[in-house]
Image: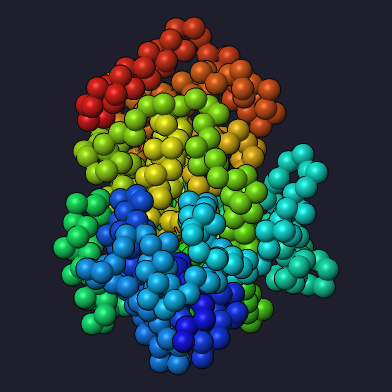
Amino acid sequence: MVKRLILVLGDQLSETLSALREADKATDLIVMAEVLDETGYVPHHPKKIALVLSAMRHFAQRLQEDGWQVAYTRLDDPEASKSIVGELMRRGQAHDTSRVIATRPGEWRLIEALENAPLSVTLLPDDRFVCSLDEFDAWAEGRKELRMEWFYREMRRKTGLMMEGDKPAGGKWNFDHDNRKPASDDMLRSRPMRFTPDAVTEEVLDLVEARFSDNFGTLRPFHFAVTRADALRALDHFARHLLAGFGDYQDAMLENDRFLHHSLLSAYLNLGLLGPLEICERIEAEWRDGKVPVNAAEGYVRQVIGWREYVRGIYFREGPDYPARNVLGHSRDLPPMYWGAQTDMNCIAHAVGQTRDEAYAHHIQRLMVTGNFALLAGIDPHQVHEWYLSVYIDAYEWVEAPNTVGMSQFADGGIIASKPYVSSGNYIARMSDYCGGCAYSVKDKTGERACPFNLLFWHFMDRHRDRFAGNPRMAQMYRTWDRMTDDRKAAVLDGAERFLSRMEAGESV
Ligand code: FAD
Ligand code: DLZ
Ligand code: SF4
């Protein structure tokens, strides 16, 4: 007889999951379900759906081999209902129980669905993070500003990572200043590790091809790891071959190198195949063994125990309305070029084209190309949020929404970012080789060929003057704007308006 149902969601594929630790192999039934509500709440990239479903199937197989009873629902099961709660009710009726143990999901939508289900659901904390939500709230309480840097230092002290006694390794908490080098094409640079799909993955790929071919994104070739063992291989490969250059080239972008020194581990971390501490311990070991410089190891550890934990704390602290925020009142529709339509902007074409092919773009592409453009052009941040949630292999709301709505679009009014991440084309020209092959000229500040980022940057600054003029970090920019002649200002603003009108009219820009 089954006593309780143990829910394991698609991004909870960790053997140490709190719900599994609570479960009893002899009497409890694990419920895992591929359901339409989860595959369809946004039009996920086909690679993302394939990754989640294949990793779920492999994880279920492993649990069964380990002696667990698992009720697994496949997407094409004719008996299946379309939601997680529907599947729990169906399994509960079949086994005459309404008791459910679950680890708290990473999205308010599902938390609310479980809390309101006509079942007796116990939600356990998701403790696959360095910082619990209570600990984050205690850190945040009473602070005027929730700056990541202060939070990150707490996490360094707490974990002892990259510490020498009570001092930060190398004498500085943050080596970001060293991490802004542009990269050049290097034929000898290693590539991220690729995995050949096994029979389980091939079956999932056929299913995704049959059902989700209308979604934006290329399904094959598919080379992601779908098991913990392979994810650990990917970590090892990154640590040995790519980590050393991570710091220096973290912000660089190249047309012909989509991955540079990035790890591509976010998908595995967010699914639960890898844990944040084991990754950081491995990274730290490379530095302690003298194999990588301190700026590389510190830079990497900061992203994982700093940014990743911090954005999660903000998402849950701010509540379910966070993804709907729009303090700048932006309302333009996301233009079709985000879904692959033709654009003359080479940087956007590359960032979007790579996103279509790989379900991946690195942080600076997300922040300073697609994110920067959306913010400058005044796109509705909710549409921007749904785009990021759809198209990236690692996108789950708890991590995507604070990055998009907060960091990238400033739609939360500055909880995450102390100033908006906006720049003219100069930044992209400095950090990438995109501008050389562009129909626009990054050197032109006005006129027909002027880079749209140059025009829109000042349009943004001008239209949000009331909000930002008092921000000391933006004062220099306003002084530059104020020094321009009225004619020049008018030429910039007219150029920006003409560009936005053409874009709104559906013209290719
Ligand atoms: P690397 O560059 O190798 O970085 C190492 C690890 O640090 C990543 O694997 C990731 O786990 C962590 N990390 C780095 N930056 C962040 C960050 N800002 N927030 C959280 N974790 C971070 N990351 C996601 O995991 N899911 C998302 O849906 C997501 N959406 C984003 C949307 C926008 C608009 C922006 C600007 C950033 C977003 N990020 C998101 C953060 C970051 O871009 C990705 O974590 C990173 O690009 C993943 O690639 P990687 O594993 O090669 O990372
Ligand atoms: C992303 C995703 C997808 C595509 N499909 C499933 C699924 O069929 N079943 C499931 O349990 N989880 C899936 N997921 C992950 C969930 O959407 C994720 O658990 C929530 O967004 C909370 O983070
Ligand atoms: Fe992008 Fe402007 Fe450079 Fe073209 S010129 S690639 S639009 S930054």
Residue farthest to the right, as pictured: 166
In the rendered image, the vertical position of residue 220 relative to residue 43, given as above or below: below
The quadrant in which residue 121 appears is bottom right
Give the residue drawn at x 58%, y 36%.
412
What residue sits 59% from the left and 81% below the top?
Answer: 21
For residue 200, side relative to residue 125 (left or right): left
- Quarter of the displayed picture in which ligand 3 can be seen: top left
Question: Measured from the top left, where is residue 370 in percent x and y?
Answer: 39, 41
Q: Quadrant of residue 308?
A: bottom right
Question: Which quadrant of the rendered structure holds the C terminus?
Answer: top left
Please tell me which residue lies in front, 55 or 284: 55
**Nearer to the camera, 285 or 218:** 218
Q: Please name the residue shown 62% across and 59% down the image.
A: 309
Question: In the rendering, at what x and y percent does residue 54 appear?
Answer: 32, 74
> Is residue 79 placed above or below 342 in the rendered structure?
below
Q: Residue at x 37, y 27 (%)?
A: 332
Q: Tell me if 304 is positioned left or right of 201 in this view.
A: right
Q: Percent x, y for residue 270?
A: 49, 65
Residue 297 shows up from this direction: no
The picture places residue 13, in percent across and down from the top left corner, at: 46, 74
